[in-house]
Amino acid sequence: MMIKDSAIAECVQKLADHFNTNIATRFLRPLLAGILADNELSRHISDLTDHADMFSSQGTHIDELYQQIIAMARFVYLVRIDVLPNIRHLGGSSSAQDVNKVFRDMAVNNFGANMKVLADIVNELYVLTINYDRLNSPKGGRPVYKGIPALDEIGRYLISR
């Protein structure tokens, strides 16, 4: 089933904007390299965050969107358990003369709060997609999300820590 829903498209755009502006910055990307080394995870995240404008114009298949939501939720979870507890040590030291020190410090200091915002947006997208799926599944048919067991982990991924 193809999704062409303005509320979902707006949420995808909001997620992409937040991710690209606050998470995937030049200061934080090196810290995320280990997580993004997973090609499948990285591809799904890229499909969601780098092509958000195409979602509005072309739509997407609902099963693909679910895989992208799962990947983004898993990303949130992995960052929370692997990166956030060690962010001060992972960030490395920068010299006092480093012109980017202020920006790097701001990115690192706000990373936890920005991850919480990202988790909230992913949850909002998940809820919108589930509701769309329920409303648009064939009468007497089974919604697509019921056939994707990995969606059972979304709550754990987004709420833990």
Image (cartoon, rainbow, N blue to C red):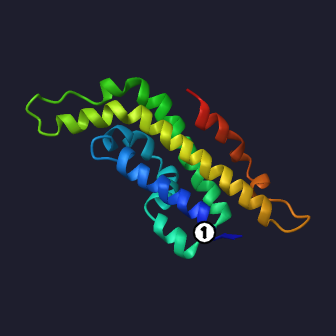
Q: Residue furthest right?
A: 140
Which of the 4 quarters of the picture holds residue 35? top left
Q: Is residue 10 above or below residue 105?
A: below
Query: What residue sits 89% from the left and 67% below the top?
Result: 139
Image position of 75 (left or right of 110): right
Q: Which residue is mark 1?
A: 60
Query: What residue sits 66% from the left and 37% below the top?
Result: 155
Place of residue 87 in the rendered image (x, y in percent of width and height, measured from the top left): 35, 28
Which of the 4 quarters of the picture holds residue 152? top right
Query: Number of numbered discs present?
Result: 1
Image position of 133 (left or right of 13): right
Place of residue 3 in the rendered image (x, y in percent of width and height, measured from the top left): 65, 68
Place of residue 100 in the rendered image (x, y in percent of width and height, measured from the top left): 17, 39
The amino acid on which the numbered mark 1 sits, given as a three-letter code, is Thr
Q: Residue furthest left?
A: 97
Looking at the rendered image, the quarter that the C terminus falls into is top right
Q: Is residue 131 above or below residue 22?
A: below
Query: What residue sits 52% from the left and 56% below the top?
Result: 44
Query: What residue sits 56% from the left and 75% below the top?
Result: 58
